[in-house]
Image (cartoon, grey):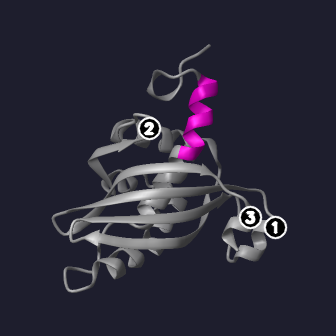
Amino acid sequence: KTAGAGGLPDAMSSMIAKPLVLAAVCAVSLLIACGGPELPAEEQIRNLNSDAESAVEAKDVGTLKDFVSDDYTDERGYDKNALIRLAQLYLLRHKAVYVYTLTKSLVIIDESNAAAEILAALAGQPISSVDQLFDLRADLMQFEVGYEREGDEWRVRSLKWRHAAVDDFL
C-alpha cells in the first residue's frame, strides 16, 4: 500500500479525507468573526458562512488554515496540520467544489466558546437550494463543531462528524 496524506495508506487517506475536508468546510463556514467586536458572537459566526463557502469553492487552503485553531483536535486524534493536509488532498482530487450549508443549531456557551450542528453538501456543481439535493450527487455530512474565541476571532477547536441524508436537510 502506498502512503497518502499524513503517512496513511492511500485508501485510508481517501476515506478520511472526505469527512475531514467537509468538517473543515463547515468549520470555515462558521468561524472567523469578521464583523468586529460590536456584533454579537452569533451574528459574527453566521456572517462568515458565505465567505467561508467562497474560500472552499476557490480552493483557498491558506484561508482555511487560518480558520482552524492551533489547538484543534478531533475524536480521531487529528491535529490542525493533519486536518489541513486532508482538506488539501480532497480539494486537489476534485475539479470543482461547491458548498451548501445549513446550520441546525448554534449555541454561544460563553464569551469564549460556541457550538454548532451543521449540515453540509459538497458537489461538483452549484447548489442553491435543498430541493436540488434530491437530484444531485453530493457528499452530505453532519457536523458537531466546537468553537473557541482567540482574541477577536472565532476558530474551530474540535469536530465530530457522520454521513447525513437528504432528509436531514429538511
Q: Is residue 48 visible?
A: no
Which quadrant, please, contains the C terminus? Answer: bottom right
Q: Secondary structure at mark 3?
A: helix
- Please state which of residues 68 and 58 is positioned toward the viewer in this rendering: 68
Q: Main secondary structure of the magenta part?
A: helix
Structural distance between the alpha carbons of marks 2 and 3: 28 Å
* Residue linked to disc 2: 85
The answer to whether 75 appears left or right of 126 in the picture is left
Q: Is residue 160 above or below residue 39?
A: above
Judge the density around disc 3: few (<14), some (14-19), many (≥20) Cα neighbours within 10 Å: some
Q: Position of residue 87 (x, y in %)?
A: 49, 44
Q: Secondary structure at mark 2?
A: helix
* Residue linked to disc 3: 166
The answer to whether 57 appears left or right of 79 in the picture is right
Q: Secondary structure at mark 1?
A: helix
Rendered image: mark on residue 134: 1
Query: Mark 1 and 3 residues: CB-CB less than 8 Å, in contact?
Result: yes
**Name of the residue lying farthest toward the front:** 109
Q: Residue at x 52, y 56 (%)?
A: 143
Which quadrant, please, contains the N terminus? Answer: top right
Q: Specify start and end residues of the magenta stretch as a single range.
A: 10-19
**Name of the residue lying farthest toward the top:** 1
**Name of the residue lying farthest toward the bottom:** 38
